[in-house]
């Protein structure tokens, strides 16, 4: 089938792309690059990405032939012969998609049948194997990666960086034919950075309920409580010189139960990174490595430094030290100390009244 040579894409960048160092004889692709093959091995701990990849593959195969038969098995509750029975030719020759979950907990019977199936895969059948990690089934995985059965591997690694999560969320909107403003995307990811499933659900709610372009105001209306309690959102607004916005976000965060100590820590992390980058010229990974930073951190700090002077950075760092002491008991009113810090940062370290 000609369609089996093309990737099924969502339009996203290589979010969660595989970083496996060990060479494999089959293609190892990111979740959003899933494509049909006789055997599709989906590995890695990120369940949401695995579900997306499997769903995209199903939709693609069904668009090729609406008569697609879909069958689901669980490898840990498997009876001998089930796979071979499902893959056997049907009377009318409909294409088949067989999805097998929990391969990391597979029974001996499943592993025996799966290894046998690899030696002679069924025509017009796509076998999807979901393996979340661990050593169980290693012989089967090694055989697939060696090229037995003509498969591909979809690696669903955990998304740890904000930019990866932003790519994922952007793909959700792009796949639905919707647009989201960059600042709204950052706010959404900041609100749900700890849980990819929640981020996906929040994105889909906005797609379903919010008409037009998704702006920062729309995100705030739906998820304002979560967005504004994020310490980095407060710091970003202050560093950009948006004093009123930063102050409102700070008060909302504190009213929602945010602890002043990590609020100061968020400011400190960003301002110290700016100070590190301010005296360095050039770019590229080598400069970032010499500073102990990632390249994206250097780029972000340079954008944040617009309008700042060395003297302003020095005053901001001094104010950070004083505020840190204040919120840890040196002053009676930690909230006033935080508001004072926001004013200093928003003025880019210039003297404020």
Image: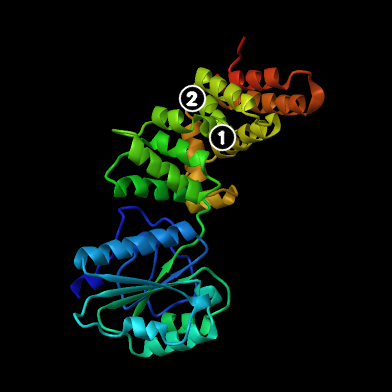
Q: Which residue is drawn at 36% across and 54% down?
A: 13
| 56 vs 334, nearest the viewer | 56
Q: List x then y, in percent, for residue 191.
A: 51, 38
Q: Residue at x 44, y 32 (%)?
A: 222
From the viewer's perspective, is 186 left or right of 317?
left
Q: List x then y, in percent, for residue 285.
A: 49, 53
From the viewer's perspective, is 210 left or right of 262?
left
Q: Nearer the viewer, mark 1 or mark 2?
A: 1
Q: Residue at x 46, y 87 (%)?
A: 80
Q: Is label 2 in a helix, a strand or a loop?
A: loop
Which badge, 1 or 2, comes first in the chain's sequence?
A: 1
Say which residue label 1 marks.
232
Residue 197 visible (yes or no): yes
Tell me which corner region of the image, top left, top right, bottom left or bottom right, holds residue 8: bottom left
Q: List x then y, in percent, for residue 225.
A: 53, 30
| 167 vs 275, nearest the viewer | 167
Of all residues shown, which one is farthest toward the top? 353
- Circles 1 and 2: CB atoms closer than 8 Å: no
The numbered disc on residue 307 is 2
Of all residues shown, which one is farthest toward the right? 330
Is 347 located above or below residue 127 in the figure? above
Is 241 located above or below residue 175 in the figure? above
Residue 295 visible (yes or no): no
| 70 vs 320, nearest the viewer | 70
Q: List x then y, in percent, for residue 161.
A: 51, 50
The numbered disc on residue 182 is none
| Mark 2 crowd level (few <14, some 14–19, many ≥20, 10 Å Cα) | few
Q: Which residue is drawn at 20% across and 75% down?
A: 1
| Mark 1 crowd level (few <14, some 14–19, many ≥20, 10 Å Cα) | many
Is 305 located above or below residue 84 in the figure? above
């Amino acid at each position: 089938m000609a369609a089996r040579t093309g990737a099924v894409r969502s339009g996203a960048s290589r979010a969660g792309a595989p970083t496996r160092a060990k060479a494999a004889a089959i293609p190892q692709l990111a979740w959003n690059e899933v494509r049909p093959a006789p055997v599709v091995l989906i590995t890695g701990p990120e369940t949401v990405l695995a579900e997306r990849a499997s769903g995209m593959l199903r939709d693609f195969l069904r668009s090729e032939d609406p008569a697609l038969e879909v069958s689901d098995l669980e490898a840990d509750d498997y009876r001998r012969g089930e796979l071979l029975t499902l893959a056997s030719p049907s009377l009318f020759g409909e294409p088949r998609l067989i999805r097998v979950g929990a391969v990391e907990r597979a029974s001996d019977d499943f592993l025996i049948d799966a290894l046998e199936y690899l030696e002679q895969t069924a025509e017009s059948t796509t076998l999807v194997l979901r393996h979340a990690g661990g050593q169980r089934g290693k012989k089967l995985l090694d055989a697939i990666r060696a090229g037995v059965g003509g498969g591909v591997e979809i690696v669903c690694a955990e998304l740890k960086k904000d930019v990866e999560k932003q790519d994922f969320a952007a793909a959700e909107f792009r796949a639905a034919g919707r647009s989201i403003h960059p600042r709204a995307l950052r706010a959404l990811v900041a609100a749900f950075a700890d849980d990819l499933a929640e981020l996906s659900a929040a994105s889909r709610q906005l797609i379903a309920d919010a008409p037009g372009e998704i702006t920062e105001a729309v995100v705030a209306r739906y998820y304002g409580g979560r967005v504004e309690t994020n310490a980095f959102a407060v710091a970003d607004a202050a560093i950009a010189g948006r004093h009123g916005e930063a102050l409102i976000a700070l008060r909302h965060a504190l009213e929602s139960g945010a602890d002043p100590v990590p609020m100061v820590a968020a400011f400190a992390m960003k301002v110290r990174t700016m100070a590190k980058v301010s005296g360095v010229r050039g770019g590229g990974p080598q400069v970032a490595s010499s500073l102990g930073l990632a390249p994206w951190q250097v780029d972000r700090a340079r954008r944040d430094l617009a309008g700042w002077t060395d003297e302003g950075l020095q005053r901001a760092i001094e104010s950070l030290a004083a505020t840190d002491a204040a919120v840890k008991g040196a002053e009676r009113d930690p909230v006033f100390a935080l508001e004072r810090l926001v004013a200093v940062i928003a003025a880019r370290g210039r003297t404020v009244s």
